[in-house]
Image (spheres, rainbow, N blue to C red):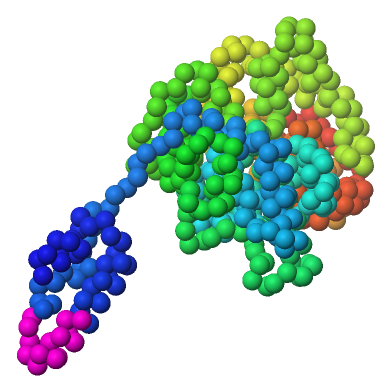
Amino acid sequence: MNSLNQLFFNKESEIPQVTLIIIHDFYINIAKTLEDRLEEPQSLTQSLQNPYNIKKDRIVDVSRYSFQEYKELYNYAINIPLHKANAIQDVKNLIDGKAQYHHYDSYWVYILVHLNNNWRHSTIITEIPEVDLSNTRATSLKWIKDNNLDIEEANSIIFQIGRSIKKISKTGAESEFRIAEPLKIPFATAICICQLRATYITLENNLPKENSGPLLWLSKKRIIQPRYTVHKRFFLHFKPGFKFSNRKMNKTLTTLIWSVFKSLKVAQVSRSHFNEDSTMYYIKLSNEQVEYLVNQLFERDSFGFINQQLINKLFANGDEDRDKETQMMLTLRQKFGDNQKVEISTGLLNRISKQNEDVLKFVNDLSKEEIKELVSKSMSNTLYSKQKYYQCVFSKCKFNNQRDCLGCPYSIINVYALSNLMDLYLNRINYLIDNFESSNIGEKQKLANQFYLLWRQIQFAKEKFGDSIYEFVEGGKDRFNRLSLQLPKTKQYLTNSIIHPEKEG
């Protein structure tokens, strides 16, 4: 028995437990048969170790990819011409049935998600939803083969996925979904190919039932390893011998994000959903590496007046451009509402202009390094915040928490705030349609002012994201425009107190 225990049944054994159980059961059966034939107990199993009771020391892979390896993988994964051609051909093989399908399209999405999100394998496979491509030109594989999506189309796809992911009832990083700017068009392209494949299989139904699959069609039970064909095909033109590991990439990503936070001197990172145990390891980064990683890891999906001014100054070419941009921003639209075209009173225009001048003075008094730090922190979601999806350029509320972030000129607003903003906007339109005309003058002034502040924030979003904002509206742009046409006229009720709505009764 000792020889068997030393050879197989011990915690140092490298044989998988499932194999040990088979060996153990086989030996037990042989021993019992022998005992029965000898017609006397031989205690052939008395001291044999039970593999169910063996607790092996778990070997945890704590390795990480280097900063350079991450950069190389990132650049390889966003190579649209290479991966688009391979993914489309692979799907055509599936449809035509002339060659083996290798799930290249799904694997491309799988790798791209890993570059910004430290998710488990099963989460990526199960939580990326199907998307509606009707707001894009991606109507066929042929179109995608011959053309590229633009950024507005990419946002339309990404915002749909982001809204779905944020509804997942989970905690930590898995409930957050990030696709940084350099990844957007490659990611959206890969999603389009997956969606067209899934749609074809569902609608045409001219393939065997067992060949149909979800949006991401990869195994849920195992991590894709280098020995599998899809790994070999995807990394065929990458570094020889490269092995992709879900766990290793997650540790790498967590380390890089934590290192950026450390470099930005972020005191609290709880909103970034990393527990302390998983972020104890970090590397020292140069300023250039921090700037690179902020752009590669985090979204730029924020809007608002001050956000635009920070970006403008950060990338300004000189005083002439800055003065021109300042003048443009101070010259507000004389009308608002896509269809209503309600004129703003001169008094209101003056008050809004004064507010904007205060914001511009604040921005122009900052050094370029201070602006870089603010922009980096806003992209990494580590600025002061008292309201979800809103960040502040100050370390505490300038207005002593007496002003809502929605109407504050110093708010940097994340695009996912539009989920609530658009609902609020359409509800406000419905309320105005039903109640405005019957309200007294004071109530009309209050309603007009509140509506204008809300409209103004949505316009900032529309200027940056275009029609992608309608992904946050049930019923889309058509419903938005239909309701806007029914708005009552509110011109004469806009007042100077719009800048201080908290004082309105």
Residue 184 image point, x, y percent: 67, 38
Residue 443 in view: no
Q: Identify whether 298 is placed above or below 476.
A: above
Numbered disc total: 0
Please identify the dominant SS of the magenta region. helix
243 or 195, nearer to the observer = 243
Q: Identify whether 330 is placed above or below 143.
A: above
Q: Residue at x 39, y 27 (%)?
A: 283
Residue 96 in view: yes
The verdict on residue 38 being magenta is: yes
Q: Identify whether 175 is placed above or below 202.
A: above
Residue extending farthest top = 319
Q: Which of the 4 image quarters holds residue 29?
A: bottom left
Q: Residue at x 11, y 78 (%)?
A: 44
439 or 66, nearer to the observer = 66
Residue 189 image point, x, y percent: 72, 44
Residue interval drawn in magenta: 30-43
Residue 225 image point, x, y percent: 47, 51
Residue 1 image point, x, y percent: 10, 70
Q: Residue at x 44, y 31 (%)?
A: 66
Quick check: 274 left or right of 91? left
Quick check: 243 left or right of 191? left
The verdict on residue 365 being magenta is: no
318 or 45, nearer to the observer = 45
Q: Identify whether 194 is placed above or below 388.
A: below
Q: Quadrant of the C terminus?
A: top right
Q: Residue at x 89, y 27 (%)?
A: 334
Q: Which of the 4 image quarters holds residue 13?
A: bottom left
